[in-house]
Image (cartoon, rainbow, N blue to C red):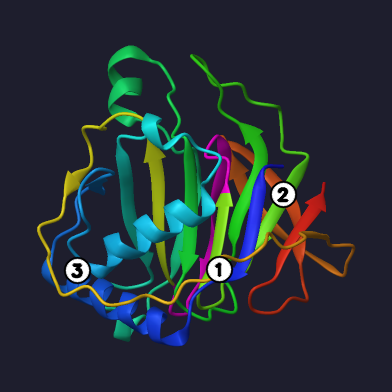
Amino acid sequence: MKIKDYGKICSNETIEVLKNSMDFVISNYKMKGTYWMSINKKPKNNIENFILKTFNLYFSKIDKKSVAGIEWWYRTSNYKVQDCNEKQKIALHFDFDEDIYASKNIVISPLGCSITYLTNTKNGPTIITNVESTGTKTHFPELPTEIVYSHPGEGKFLTFDPKYLHGIGETEECRLTLLYNIWNYKITDARELSFSEDLVTLEIDNNKEKNINEYTGPFEYIDMDVLKMPMSVKKPSKYNLYDTYHIEL
């Protein structure tokens, strides 16, 4: 599977800068859809600053001339970063241009995608399956045969093929992530954020890709709907912050 775990890529100070900026956005802007930053414009805030720096560091195989911009958004267990107490669970889904799909029934996927974890959350892993959406139609294997579980940890950076069916396991803990998709054209759903602030020097490492280990047990079993098909799947019962595991089903 095309998944890359780079571990913790930034300093604690950089994590706090990002949290402060995101706390302001969460508190002062009503998020409808996603945000957009043009690849040719200077970042206006430290969220966009972080996105641009990580894009340049970790997506070197993407031809920069083909990129129009980056769509970004956040996921949090609660509206306020400092007051996370609601359950969070994101159903398995694909990332694609929903407007194009609605009007033309064509599935267009981003060029790449990433997740940056900004909290130490014991539960609520990202779940990535090997079910893929491809081309002008969506191809569904009957059921996934592989799953990767990416457990959060402050500053962890993960990239994966946006064609994979993915979601978030349930958690009641505080969980905050920054996510972005890379596009070769401006999608209509995403809008530019007006929020501006002084940019600071962000300490971001150019880490090498970590090995994603095969998890061999012990297991727990969770029930999930895979494209409206109920399925009981294995998940790790023993894991630590930052762990990423691959499981053959």
Residue 34 position within the rendered picture, expressed as x and y whole percent measured from the top left: 26, 48
Judge whether residue 202 is colored magenta.
no
- Residue 231, quarter of the rendered image: top right
Residue shown at the point (90%, 62%) measured from the top left: 216
Q: Are marks 2 and 3 in contact (CB under 8 Å)?
A: no
* Residue 125: % across, % down: 59, 65
Q: Amino acid at mark 3?
A: Val
Mark 1 residue crowding within 10 angstroms, few (<14) / some (14–19) / many (20+) = many
Crowd band around label 3 with a 10 angstrom C-alpha radius: few (<14), some (14–19), many (20+): some
Indicate which disc, 1 or 3, sits on the residue closer to the N terminus. 3
Mark 2 lies on a secondary structure that is strand
**Disc 2 to disc 3, C-alpha distance:** 33 Å
Amino acid found under the numbered disc labelled 2: Ile
User: Which is more N-terminal, label 3 or label 2?
Assistant: 3
Instruction: Name the amino acid type tagged 1.
Output: Gly
Q: Residues within 10 Å of mark 2 (few under 14, many from 20)?
A: many
Q: Which mark is residue 97?
A: none
Badge 1 or badge 2: first in the primary sequence: 1
78 to 158, vertically: above or below: below
Badge 3 is on which residue?
25
Please, which residue is most extreme toward the right here? 216
Q: Position of residue 83 (x, y in %)?
A: 31, 85
Q: Nearer the viewer, mark 2 or mark 3?
A: 3
> In this rendering, which labeled residue sits more in front, label 1 or label 3?
3
Q: Which mark is residue 147?
A: 2
Of residues 47 and 60, which is closer to you in this image? 60
Q: Which residues are magenta?
A: 160-175
Residue at mark 1:
124
Secondary structure beneath disc 3?
helix
